[in-house]
Amino acid sequence: MSNEKIIADLKGMVKGCKFEPYLKHIRFPFIKNLEPGLKIQFDFPFTALVGQNGTNKSAVLRALYGSPKDYNLGNFWFSTALDPIDESGGRARFIYCYYQPDAKRYVEVIKTRIKRTYRNSQTINPDYWEPSRPIISDGMERMPNMNVVSVGRDKTRWKLIEKNVVFLDFRSKISAFDKYFYHGDLKQTLRHNSKQDFIRSKSPHLKEVAENGLHSKKMYRGRKEQVLYNKTLSQNQIEIISIILGREYKEINIIKHRFFKAVGESVVLRSKGLKYSEAFAGSGEFAVVMLISELFDAAPASLILLDEPEVSLHPGAQERLVEFLLRKIKTDRHQVIVGTHSPYIIKGLPENAIKTLYLDPSDNKVKVINETVPSQAFFHLGVQDKDKITIFVEDRLAKELVLAALRMLGEALYQKFSVIYPPGGASVILGGYFVAYARTSRKDSFFLMDGDQRPKTSIDFQRDFQFLNDAQLQLDVKLAVGFDPELTTDGSGEVRSAQVREARIKILEYAKIYLDYLPGENPEIFIWERMNHSKFGVSTDYKSEASHKERFRFLCIKELGRASFEDVNADEIFELQKRCVASVDPLELSRLSGIVKSFASV
């Protein structure tokens, strides 16, 4: 069965509420440097959180881990004297939504970081996360009167979701051998002069357990148990691992033990006459074996959280891992949420399955795009086609306009460009990418902003910026970018002043060549004023009292035969707008084609 067929089936299962209990969304009124109120929706049972380092993907996964009953975020995120948790803006807290089966309605639950004193020992835990009554200022609904709804709740709050959680961090999931050899402590004795000697002395015991299928091995004077479990994977599990890794395995055992001092897992694999442990296996083999074992042990409808599962896996193995996860979701009704940097993990996923976290340089807060086209996510992950010139635009409608202009220039130029719209709009594009590219003098990218971003006061690009004073340079940069960007330097005093001046000159020189604007105030106005209105059965002034954005919404309702009180979504409007772009007279696009053509000659 193809991924497309499984994805279609999973969409149907979501509509049929087949994954309950299911996390519908999570939002963060105040936690770390996430934008206050940031909300991540889970519209598909496989969710990929993508974004560059520092965008708090792991923090989101850990909050999800701490959401269900009997799970505590404090197990992963806690304060120390060196790294205290900043709560100057209020208590750290998060809110999630799920369908409460007893109350038969969607509800929101909040968990807040508090100090908890344990009765028996009077020990204080400053990182205990406890559910509390709804906080109305966080946009939560007041609890209904007990006489109206008395089930699925305590007196002051809704019950927590009850869901088994499997959380695997593939950066820290290491074998017993690696745990000791790379991170363990060797206490030198006459018998063991090296870690290698120690491992050699303990390996016969591990071999005995593996070859004889032992579930117990006691050693030392206190007869301390060394084997916590010893299990042989089923033939079905072995076949799945073989498919993912592209190797044929005959037998796989997982032994949890303490032969190498600390508790850890060893994996013993047999493949085509070879039998070896994780000490000689690749780290990818160990990771996939542990993942498959964990998922087959997980209760149905579990919450599966995977942090960077692509670690140590080649691209083909990553794609086959996703195929397996999608099938496992369908058969076991799991909800899987993955934090990843890999374009191979998100390849082929629907847009509402990809959540892009990004840092907005204008306020240094992490924000989210809840629906991301895979190609846009590839860019955000740093995956660019080196053979193409990148054109940055503000949104997908602007991209459609630029693509229409490129088609007029022929296939050769069309194939030369890649048009992208990173999340965050003009402030992120200009304040983040444009400034950074200007300072490094990149020549593989151009920036086409909406017309309303054009400076109200024009910048004289014929001047030699070297002769401008610092105040004029600062003013011109502010005009070009829309605000005065924070320019990092590696010096102070006069050195910093000189570096800031040099950066501003570079930004203006870069803007002269690599920054331009779309014709018209914005794409909606440009398209509406130049499209073939008769083709859509409306006049130019259709719904003239509304904004151009609203006119497209009304036209979409009309086209789809919806009632006046019904609405349409953004995707439906965009599909209409694409048809409207196709109806624009090519002559009206000639100016835009000229701008794009000039980029190719730089």
Image (spheres, rainbow, N blue to C red):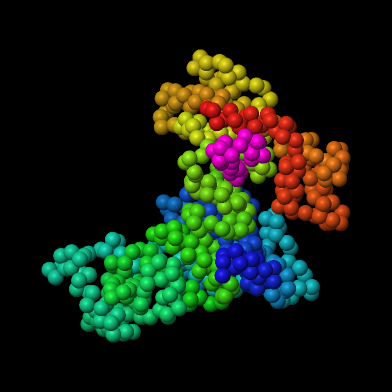
Q: Nearer the viewer, residue 194 or 69?
A: 194
Which residue is at 61% across, 67% downward?
Answer: 5
210 is within the stretch colored magenta? no
Q: Quadrant of residue 583?
A: top right
Q: Position of residue 49 (x, y in %)?
A: 54, 56
Residue 92 seen anywhere in this rendered image of the structure: no
- 546 versus 241 height, above or below: above
Tell me if 138 is positioned left or right of 329 in this view.
right
Q: Residue at x 37, y 72 (%)?
A: 248
Side of 312 relative to 436 (left or right) = left
Residue 182 at least partly seen: yes
57, above or below 434, in the image: below
The image shows residue 424 at horizontal and vertical percentages of 61, 43
Front residue of this view, candidates 509 and 78: 509
Name the residue at 38% across, 80% down. 232
Q: Position of residue 207 (x, y in %)?
A: 25, 78
In depth, the one of 302 and 152 nearer the eye is 302
Direction from residue 184 to residue 527 in the image, left or right: right
Q: Residue 558: x, y in percent? A: 84, 51
Residue at 48% in and 65% down? 321
The stretch of residues the image draws in magenta is: 403-425
257 in relation to 519, above or below: below
Looking at the rendering, in which quadrant would you find the N terminus?
Answer: bottom right
In the image, residue 74 above or below residue 84: below
371 and 185: which is toward the camera? 371
Number of marks present in the image shown: 0
Q: Residue furthest left?
A: 190
